[in-house]
Image (tube, helix red, strand yellow):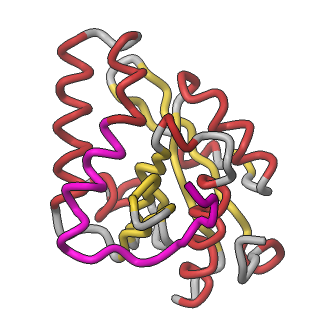
C-alpha cells in the first residue's frame, strides 16, 4: 500500500464510510465509558455524520480508502445545540483516524485542512472540545498551537469537556506539510 495521504472534501456517498471510521476510531472509549453513556455517545456520533449541520466533512484517504475524517461546524449552536457557549467561529468535531492508519500524520493533515478552510471562511479562530480520556489528541492539539479556551468548557454529565482554540491569524498553514 502506498502511503500517500489524500485530503479532500467528502461527498454524500462517503457518509457511511466516515461513520465506519469514526466508530472504529472511537470504539476504544466504549471500554472505559459506562454502557448507557457509550450508547448515547455512539448515537450522537452517527447523528453528526449523517445530519446536515456540518459545513464541511473532510476526509483522508490512502489508496482510495477512507482512513480519517473530521467534521467542521459553523458555531456552538450547530455543533452542540448550545448557543450559550457563544462560539461563532468554526468548531472541529469528530476528528477520527482508523487505528490501522495511526502514526502516519493523518490527524495533523485533517486539522491543517480544517484550519485552512476556516481561514478561507474568514474565521479568526478554530475551536474544538475534548475530554481527558483523549490524552493523545490533547497532546497533538497543543503541539499544533491550540490553546485552552476555559470559557468554552462544558460539562457532559460528570465529564468535563475542555475547550481549545487555535488562533488562525497567527498560525494557519495553507498546506498539510
Q: What stretch is highlighted in magenta?
A: 1-23
Position of residue 161 measured from the top left corner of the image (x, y, whole percent): 49, 34
- In what quadrant of the picture does the N terminus appear? bottom right
View extreme (front): residue: 1
User: 65 and 18: which one is in front?
Assistant: 65
- In what quadrant of the picture does the C terminus appear? bottom right
Vertical relation: 156 (above or below) 80: above
Position of residue 13 measured from the top left corner of the image (x, y, whole percent): 18, 71
User: 108 and 139: which one is in front?
Assistant: 108
Quarter assignment of residue 70: bottom left
Vertical relation: 160 (above or below) 174: above
Q: Which residue is drawn at 72% across and 83% down?
A: 174
Quarter assignment of residue 41: top left
Q: Residue at x 31, y 52 (%)?
A: 80
Image-based side of 95 in relation to 22, left or right:
right
Vertical relation: 67 (above or below) 63: above
Position of residue 164 measured from the top left corner of the image (x, y, whole percent): 63, 49
In magenta segment, residue 12: yes
Position of residue 154 measured from the top left corner of the image (x, y, whole percent): 45, 37
Quarter assignment of residue 126: bottom right
Vertical relation: 160 (above or below) 80: above
In magenta segment, residue 168: no
User: 5 and 47: which one is in front?
Assistant: 5
Q: Which residue is drawn at 61% across and 62% down?
A: 111
Image-based side of 34 in relation to 116, left or right:
left
Q: Please count the marks in the image.
A: 0
User: 47 and 26: which one is in front?
Assistant: 26
Q: Which residue is drawn at 62% across and 83% down?
A: 119
Amino acid at each position: 500500500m502506498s502511503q500517500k495521504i489524500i485530503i479532500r472534501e467528502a461527498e454524500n456517498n462517503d457518509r457511511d464510510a466516515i461513520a465506519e471510521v469514526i466508530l472504529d476510531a472511537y470504539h476504544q472509549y466504549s471500554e472505559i465509558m459506562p454502557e448507557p453513556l457509550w450508547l448515547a455517545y455512539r448515537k450522537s456520533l452517527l447523528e453528526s455524520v449523517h445530519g446536515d449541520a456540518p459545513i464541511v466533512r473532510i476526509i483522508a484517504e490512502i489508496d482510495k480508502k477512507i482512513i480519517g475524517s473530521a467534521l467542521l461546524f459553523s458555531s456552538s449552536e450547530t455543533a452542540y445545540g448550545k448557543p450559550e457557549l457563544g462560539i461563532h467561529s468554526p468548531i472541529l468535531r469528530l476528528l477520527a483516524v482508523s487505528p490501522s492508519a495511526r502514526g502516519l500524520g493523518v490527524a495533523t493533515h485533517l486539522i491543517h485542512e480544517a484550519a485552512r478552510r476556516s481561514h478561507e471562511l474568514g474565521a479568526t479562530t478554530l475551536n474544538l472540545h475534548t475530554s481527558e480520556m483523549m490524552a493523545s489528541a490533547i497532546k497533538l492539539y497543543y503541539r499544533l498551537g491550540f490553546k485552552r479556551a476555559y470559557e468554552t468548557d462544558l460539562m457532559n454529565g460528570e465529564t468535563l469537556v475542555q475547550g481549545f482554540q487555535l488562533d488562525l491569524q497567527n498560525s494557519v498553514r495553507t498546506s498539510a506539510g
